[in-house]
Image: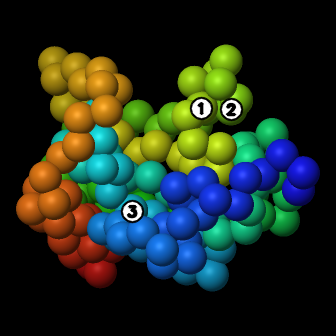
Amino acid sequence: MADYESDNIFAKILRGDLPAHTVYEDDAALAFMDVMPRADGHVLVIPKAPSRNLLEMELADLGPLFVAVQKVARAVKAGLGAEGMTIQQFNESAGGQVVFHTHVHLLPRWTDVPLRPHTGQMETQEVLAAHAEKIRAALAE
């Protein structure tokens, strides 16, 4: 894949070069806490197969990724007691993509609680760990 940069932050997480608060993993996907969450419990789901974005994914990788997205989204909603979910996926800079490895944002939502802006402010490790534990517990049920 010519446009895929294998040194992006998500590729580093997949290789184990960078830590992450993992909530789910299978043969095709990895789900972990976003360190700059726009909502409490913001999770990212990424395919293990390299791809720049959804538009460039191999079709064989698409289905397994979204099976994981649905499974983890249900657990995020249940584990955080959310009233709803926003599921987002961005493609290319003009579409809002910042990290060029396909990824899906899972954002738990509550009535009258707006999403925080993407300011680059990092959440504490303790808060991320606590949210991850709630989501893993919901996955285990």
Q: In this figure, which residue is indicated by the disc labeled 2?
A: 91
Left or right? Give the position of 118 relative to 131: right
Q: In this figure, which residue is indicated by the disc labeled 1?
A: 97
Is residue 73 or residue 42 the one in the foreground?
A: 42
**Can you give x and y, in whole percent of width and height, for residue 132 in the image?**
23, 65
Residue drawn at the location 29% of the way across and 80% of the way down: 140
**Element type at mark 1:** loop
Vertically, is 112 above or below 82? Answer: above
Left or right? Give the position of 4 relative to 100: right
Number of the label disc, if any, that sits on residue 32: 3
- Report the residue that reaches farthest toward the right: 2
Name the amino acid, label 2.
Asn
Q: Earlier in the sequence, mark 2 or mark 1?
A: 2
Q: In which quarter of the image is the N terminus?
A: bottom right
Q: Earlier in the sequence, mark 3 or mark 2?
A: 3
Tag 2 and tag 1, C-beta contact below 8 Å: yes
